[in-house]
Image: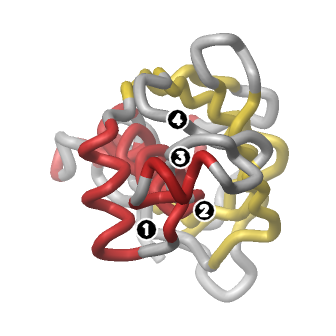
Amino acid sequence: MTAIDPVSSPHIRLWWEDLAVGDTRDLGSVTVTEDDIIAFARQFDPQPFHLDHEAARHSVFGGLCASGWHTCALAMRLMVTNFLHESSSLGSPGLESLKWLKPVFPGDTLTLRHSIVDKRPMNKRPDVGLVRTVWQMFNQRGEQVLQMEGWGMFRRRAPGHG
């Protein structure tokens, strides 16, 4: 494999080699609205506590709350907008862990933190490196509402080196 010329890929600012174990990034915030919660739920997770105030009031959540999948989608949007779009990301082979730790309610402002906990070259693809990350999302009270862990694939600037 030959090295990728960063000049020929001007949108890429971060390559696998630039991502270090221990790096932590705050990737922005988003405020969840009632309309967003209901629209997402209607399309993807039409359970009563995501759609109806009365049903939600009688649920374990005590009020209308976002689908966990909606929270994941919001985290993904922040990740793409504030990190992946300027990286050599090639997608992900999947998640190892996903936890919805607290419900997300209308008006909550969620902030995403991304931490790199491991990395290694990909054995079968010398032009790709793997990065293991932890995604943590917090509400405006500092309570963690989401944690995801998994691997991402990133193109290497210099395949086979380091």
Q: Callout 2 environment at 10 Å: few (<14), some (14 to 19), or many (20+)?
A: some
Name the element at disc 3.
loop
From the top left corner, tell me how far across and down residue 50 is, in percent.
Answer: 47, 58
- Reading the image, the residue beneath label 4 is 105
Check the image and name the residue furthest to the top.
141
Numbered label attached to residue 90: 1
Residue displayed at 25% across by 59% down: 39
Q: Is residue 99 above or below residue 22?
A: below
The mark that comes first in sequence, 3 or 1, is 3
- The answer to whether the residues at label 1 and label 2 have Cβ atoms under 8 Å apart is yes
Q: Nearer the viewer, mark 4 or mark 2?
A: 4
The CA distance from mark 4 to mark 2 is 29 Å
Q: Which residue is mark 3?
A: 65
| SS type, badge 2 | strand
Front position in the image: 43 or 153: 43
What residue would you read off at disc 2?
A: 152
Q: Earlier in the sequence, mark 3 or mark 4?
A: 3
Give the Cα separation between the discs numbered 1 and 2: 7 Å
Q: Of the residues shown, which amino acid type is indicated by label 4?
A: Phe
> Which is nearer the N-term, disc 4 or disc 1?
1
Camera-near label (4 vs 1) is: 4
Mark 1 is on which residue type?
A: Leu
Amino acid on which disc 3 is placed: Cys
Residue at x-position 49% and y-position 51% = 54
> Where's residue 123, x and y in %?
74, 81
When the figure is inspected, residue 155 is found, relative to residue 45, above or below; the finding is above
Residue 159 is at least partly visible in this image = no
Q: SS class of the residue under badge 4?
A: loop
Which colouring convention does the figure follow?
Answer: secondary structure
